[in-house]
Amino acid sequence: MRTKSPHIGILFFLAIGVLPFAAAFVYALLYSFGAVGVLNTSYTTAFWAAVFRSGEFFKSLGYSAAIAAVSVAVSVGLALWLVLSYRRDFEKKALSFVLYLPLAIPGVVAAFFTFQLLAQSGFFARITYALGGIDKARQFPDLVNDPWAVGILLTFISLVTPFFVLLFMNVYKNERLGELKTLAVSLGATPRQVRWRVSIPILLTKTRTLIVLYFIFILGAYEVPLILGQQSPQMLSVLIIREMRQFDLAKIPEGYAVAVLYTFIVSGAAVLLFYRKKKTADAF
Amino acid sequence: MFLEVKQIRKSFGQEQVVTDLTFSLERHKTLSILGQSGCGKTTMLKMLGGLVTPDGGDIRLDGASISHKKPEQRNIIYLYQEDLLFPHLNVFENIAFGLRLKKHPAKEVRQKVETMVESLELQGQQSKMPHQLSGGQRQRVSFGRAIINNPALLLLDEPFGSLDAGTRQRMQQLFKKIAGAFSITSLFVTHDLKEAILMGDEIAFMKSGVLKVYKSKQAFIEDPETGVQSEIGFWKDLK
């Protein structure tokens, strides 16, 4: 019985976790090459050629990667600063609640809040108007659906930072960072050297896989850029859904081609990440 | 005297942890301090290292008061009870840590670390990460990392407490050898009677925050309070 149970587990995982995803991927691949689909008649690379020719995918990929990179970098930096400066305060019950609360807020709700706060007809614009800072709504800076993705970035940062604060606090405790800092001081390190040579490298080394996974997660985010993003370029998931829901049915295979391309890139990054992690673990 | 400690005291709230601590130590000597858990040994060492601020008294090193100096300016290294290594650095970089802080030239760092690795019998382990090492190896790296900085005073807080008997014995021998080779001045805190006698040039006993330094090892052995006599009695009765 004991030898059978791991196989059952693997089969269950394949049936529930892998098979539907693989089937959907194959379907998308066939659709993108014209092999299946309402208007498709025969195999063609025309849809892929159209995707590469338009350049919208790469623009969208670059835009998404930039947003994900800035969001993760700012969140990680902010969380590091908070943990290294106010760790003891965060251990108190009231503040720990403040940390957990944003984790329970869905992305779509957070995006809606941001919209209500930062839009030209939003809360801050109204306060600024009431205080005499602006005469018309459009004088308020464009912070949502804007070209610099300020609204998207602020939403992601406010959602992701608490997660990294909790993560770093956990690593701080597990890695006995407090004692390592005292040890470094005893070995002659100044407070600045302790921060840059001990605290930050340990926290980042121990969490780098999760940091990369969060980057991938934001890269594929949908609700937040849908509500707060601009028309062009759009983040990847928004672009894919837009392509698939076009009135022009002939354009749908292009949406699938973009989805397949995106899946290849993200899967490749994930495989590389875990391969490297396993290689490092094996070396140890 | 190289190290002079005068009437150091420390309380945490109502509890007096260290009471009028006064003793001295010659250069290149090791003072063993025996005491049970919770008697104030660790607090005493941390005060000497500048990691805990005493309520009063004075600490003088090589004739100069260091009581108001920051820990990083004292050139006193406190070694933890456990073999605490930096988890993000390999053996080489752990040992080189103090030298890198002081921005020694890379060539000098390499040369010094390689000499230290040899002294610690850790050849071929330089690129390993801390979790790839055994307890004894980790403790040796910990020693090397402290000694390579040529500290004026080394404070060892039950350094072999977590090791098995065999490894502990080997580490005791290795420490004696290294302390001699690098002319180390140290305070060696332990709760093991035999270790206290073996490791120290001088010996002291700490109880309830009060330190008593013995004039000779014989005086230490003869004092019934240290527990040596009851230990001898136990082994005799066993025969």
Image (tube, coloured by chain):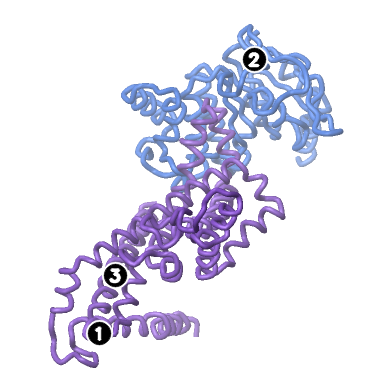
Chain colours: A purple, B blue
Q: Please, is residue A245 above or below residue A163 in the view?
A: below
> Would residue B199 be found to the left or right of residue B115 on screen?
right
- Which is in the foreground here, disc 2 or disc 3? 3
Mark carried by residue A262: 3
Residue A223, percent from left and from top: 45, 71
- Which is in the foreground here, disc 1 or disc 2? 1
What residue is pinned by disc 2? Answer: B66
What is the distance, in whole Å, between disc 2 and disc 3 at their CAs?
63 Å
Q: Local crowd at mark 3 within 10 Å, few (<14), some, or many (≥20)?
A: some
The residue under the point 39% across, 35% down is B92
Q: Amino acid at mark 3?
A: Tyr
Residue A168, percent from left and from top: 54, 51
Q: Amino acid at mark 1?
A: Asp
Q: Please, is residue B32 above or below residue B66 in the view?
A: below
Q: Amino acid at mark 2?
A: Ile
SS category of the residue bearing label 3: helix
Q: Looking at the image, do the residues carrying marks 1 and 3 touch, with CB atoms under 8 Å apart? A: no
Q: Local crowd at mark 2 within 10 Å, few (<14), some, or many (≥20)?
A: some
Mark carried by residue A248: 1
The residue under the point 36% across, 53% down is A280
Residue A126, percent from left and from top: 57, 58
